[in-house]
Amino acid sequence: MHDETVIRLTFFFGIFAFMAVWELVSPRRSLATSKTTRWLNNLGITLLNPVVVRAVSPFLPVGMALLAQKNGWGLLNNLILPYWLEVAAAVIVLDLVIYLQHVMFHTVPLLWRFHMMHHADLDIDVTTGLRFHPMEMIISMGIKLSTVALIGPPALAVLIFEILLNGTSMFNHGNVRLLTIIDRRLRLFVVTPDMHRVHHSVIIRETNSNFGFNFSWWDRLLGTYRDQPAAGHEGMTIGLSQFRDQRRLTLLWLLALPFIGNPGDYAINRRGKEPS
């Protein structure tokens, strides 16, 4: 695992470049705002987050997995299972935890304040999949570290999961066009761009659906799946109803958003309301 950083960065830049080119060649929607401005702000947050997380957290998930293995922590470190099964089970459990975490960030009003920065983007593309408030990243890291300590997964499983989580976030936020038949087949197993785009709709009942990042089956199994946006993918409005002024969506304003912004009626505990 000494090459973890190199491996992760290689996948990150490779997937990012692939999605950026795909968006240029075959975009799903016309952008409503300046791509240059959005990319500068979104990528600024992307560069800031790892610095903040590393300053706060003494471990990353792979390091915690190695520590758990050394000390015999966690369920899988105390069971005798084939290695491949441990890896597969750990990736699936970690993905379920991230799904539940995502639902939690839409349910608890304080957590929604941090998560709404992600949803305040007025367009959706590959950079939206990297745009999360530093406080959300810190809380998410705490949840991942606790989960790794509890289940004791192999370090390889954690590395695979981290690469998948980062890569699929860029993929399913991509402004890319897929043939309907391909989308239908893919979304039986993974979250596709058309499936996740519904989650970024301004309509609250659509925002509170399709929470999955990697595997699509959690939404189907747990009743949060929505097939298509009511207005269609070209006609739907992206973002939050209370943040529509693109001139205010600067990097500093986005960082301050959880503390000064109106959370609106999007938290699940206010389900049923719709923006006026």
Image (tube, helix red, strand yellow):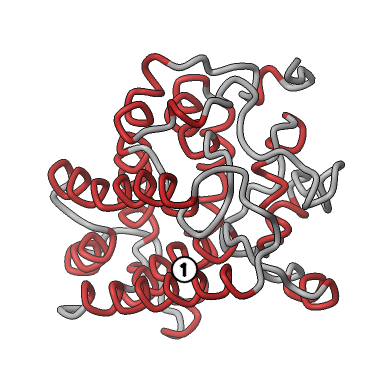
Left/right placement of residue 268 relative to residue 133 reads: right
Where residue 107 appears, x then y in whole percent? 58, 27
For the residue pair 254 and 12, the one nearer the viewer reads as 254
**Is 236 above or below relative to 12?**
above
- Give the quadrant of the N terminus: bottom left
Task: Name the residue at 70% across, 62% down.
Answer: 28
For the residue pair 165 and 150, the one nearer the viewer reads as 165
Task: Identify the amino acid type marked 1.
Answer: Gly
Where residue 122 appears, x then y in whole percent? 57, 39
- Residue under pointer 1: 167
Task: Name the residue at 59% across, 38% down.
Answer: 103
**Is 19 above or below relative to 197?**
below
Number of labelled discs? 1
For the residue pair 76 and 130, the one nearer the viewer reads as 130
Where residue 172 appears, x then y in whole percent? 60, 61
For the residue pair 271 and 253, the one nearer the viewer reads as 253
Where residue 80 appears, x then y in whole percent? 41, 78
